[in-house]
Amino acid sequence: MKHILAPLAVLLTASAAQAHNGLHMHPHGSESWLPVTVALAVMGVAAAAWKVSK
């Protein structure tokens, strides 16, 4: 299970950035830092899961 968690978290994080040209951390039309915080948390979980799976 832990071998699946890291790639899944990375794919979920990367899919929004790959949906259109340009890599950026803000959702369109949002003035809140909450989505950025959530994205950073997901990346942190992905990094932790990757580290544990090694």
Image: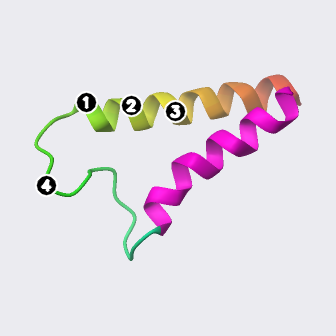
Residue 24 x, y percent position in the rendering: 34, 58
- Distance CA(mark 1)–CA(mark 3): 12 Å
Amino acid type assigned to the residue bearing label 2 in the image:
Val
- Discs 2, 4 touching: Cβ within 8 Å: no
* Furthest residue toward bottom: 21
Q: Which mark is residue 38?
A: 2
Residue 53 x, y percent position in the rendering: 86, 28
- Discs 3, 2 touching: Cβ within 8 Å: yes
Image-based side of 22 in relation to 31, left or right = right
Q: Tell me which residue sits at (77%, 28%) in the image.
A: 51
Image-based side of 24 in relation to 31, left or right = right
Task: Tell me the quarter of the image containing the N terminus.
Answer: top right
User: To which residue does mark 1 refer?
Assistant: 34
User: To which residue does mark 4 refer?
Assistant: 29
The stretch of residues the image draws in magenta is 1-18
Q: Tell me which residue sits at (83%, 27%) in the image.
A: 2
Mark closer to the chain start, 1 or 3 = 1
- Discs 1, 3 touching: Cβ within 8 Å: no
Q: Which mark is residue 42?
A: 3
Does the magenta portion include 42? no
Q: Quick one: 44 or 18, which is closer to the camera?
A: 18
* Foreground disc of the pair 4, 3: 4
Residue 23 x, y percent position in the rendering: 40, 64
